[in-house]
Amino acid sequence: MKINHNFDNLVPNYLFADIAKRTNAYIAANPDKKVIKLGIGDVTLPLAPVVVDALKKGADELGVKETFKGYPDYEGYAFLREAISGYYASFGVTVDKDEILVNDGAKSDTANIGDIFGTENTVVVTDPVYPVYVDSNIMAGREIVIAPSTAENGFCAMPDESVKADIIYLCSPNNPTGAAYSREQLKAWVDYANKNDAIILYDAAYEAFITDDCPRSIFAIEGARTCAIEFCSLSKTAGFTGTRCGYTVIPRELERDGHNIYKLWYRREATKFNGVSYPVQCAAAAVFSEEGQRQIRENLEYYKENARIIASALDELGIYYTGGKNSPYIWLKCPNGMGSWEFFDYLLENAQVVGTPGEGFGECGRGYFRLTSFGDRDNTIEAVERIRKLLGRS
Ligand code: MLT
């Protein structure tokens, strides 16, 4: 037998697994040191009370014969899809409940969607990039072309008309840079995709952090319904990193190569995925209630304040950074010309603060570093103090 030798082309470890390994080795060797983790974008605030109530109520219903549920619908319960459709309407975007498929988070679907596309397709990713898009396409053996996001283009890579893309991954607000595409920029991508018969795989996992008038959905852009699929997640919006729930939107009219894309994905999901548990779908629906939105906004404000705390320290230190405004991530230039991994080690060893080396997100991330605002407030303040002290001013 043979294994899938495309795996030979991957870097040895998934980025965040690599960071966890290095961090744990440091902690084991230095048990007396308090390490503060601002690396992986994992939330620290508890679920909103209204969400927990819905989760418990859903679990209680499973314990009663009359309300017990077995397998969920493959596309998710109608009550949740209706709530999501209403959420889109609240910011002026029309998405029918029958175009929504509930999933266990955007990571799985942005990777698994490749099942329905041929391996001969060319994939365009903006770089720096969330490693899942790259790794999953390397596993499938697809050719990957990079669209560089740099300080010069405001970390918003634009289409290169000389490249014939078939699949395009966009993430806005961006992980890791925090840059968000404007309406005009997204329109250029949509026009390019329609012209090239390509499909945009749009990751909107951080849309809830948008504070200006940047679009919250690719479907706010004219022409997107014939060229885009959107993935969203409650992980960052509502603290579901451990609870697991998200959704994928596929317009019913989206077709390629003589096939309806919604139908293909539904076929794939029915074969390989049995859905998200009933209590979790109840909890997710509660996020979209009026009270749920009020409560999750409080948590989002807390993280945004953390971002402000980190950003103001970098301002004082004269360190170049972007993000932190429409995004929970701060993307900074490593001080004193250090490399990304060099700065990772320097910060861990001298300040016991963990971040994410920009290089882990691709070539264009070299010399950059990502800090997350999802930490606990006291830890964020302490980490910032340590960084101030280490980098010259206290
Ligand atoms: C990140 O830190 O980039 C994210 O937490 C990773 C993820 O959402 O899978």
Image: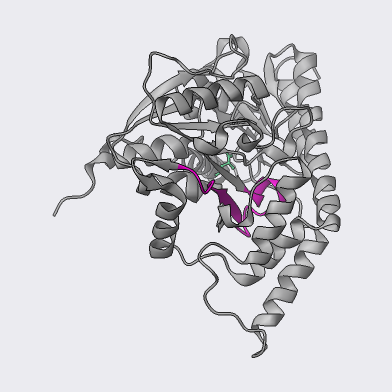
Quadrant assignment, res 292: bottom right
Quadrant assignment, res 329: top right
Q: Position of residue 184 (x, y in %)?
A: 64, 20
Residue drawn at x 26%, y 38% is 8
Q: Position of residue 350 (x, y in %)?
A: 63, 27
Asked if residue 242 is among those painted magenta in the image, a careful observer would answer yes
Q: Position of residue 26 (x, y in %)?
A: 54, 40
Quarter holding the N terminus? bottom left
Colouring of the image:
one colour
Q: Which residues are magenta?
A: 233-254
Q: Is any part of residue 249 visible from this angle?
A: yes
- Asked whether, in this view, residue 10 is left or right of residue 363, the answer is left
Q: Position of residue 223 (x, y in %)?
A: 56, 31
Question: Dividing the image into four equal quarters, which quarter contains ligand 1?
Answer: top right
Asked if residue 109 is among those painted magenta in the image, a careful observer would answer no
- Asked whether, in this view, residue 349 is left or right of residue 14, the answer is right
Looking at the image, residue 228 lies above or below residue 145: below
Foreground residue among 62 and 285 = 285
Foreground residue among 165 and 13 = 165
* Furthest residue in direction left, as rendered: 1
Quadrant assignment, res 307: top right
Foreground residue among 274 and 136 = 274
Quarter holding the C terminus? top right
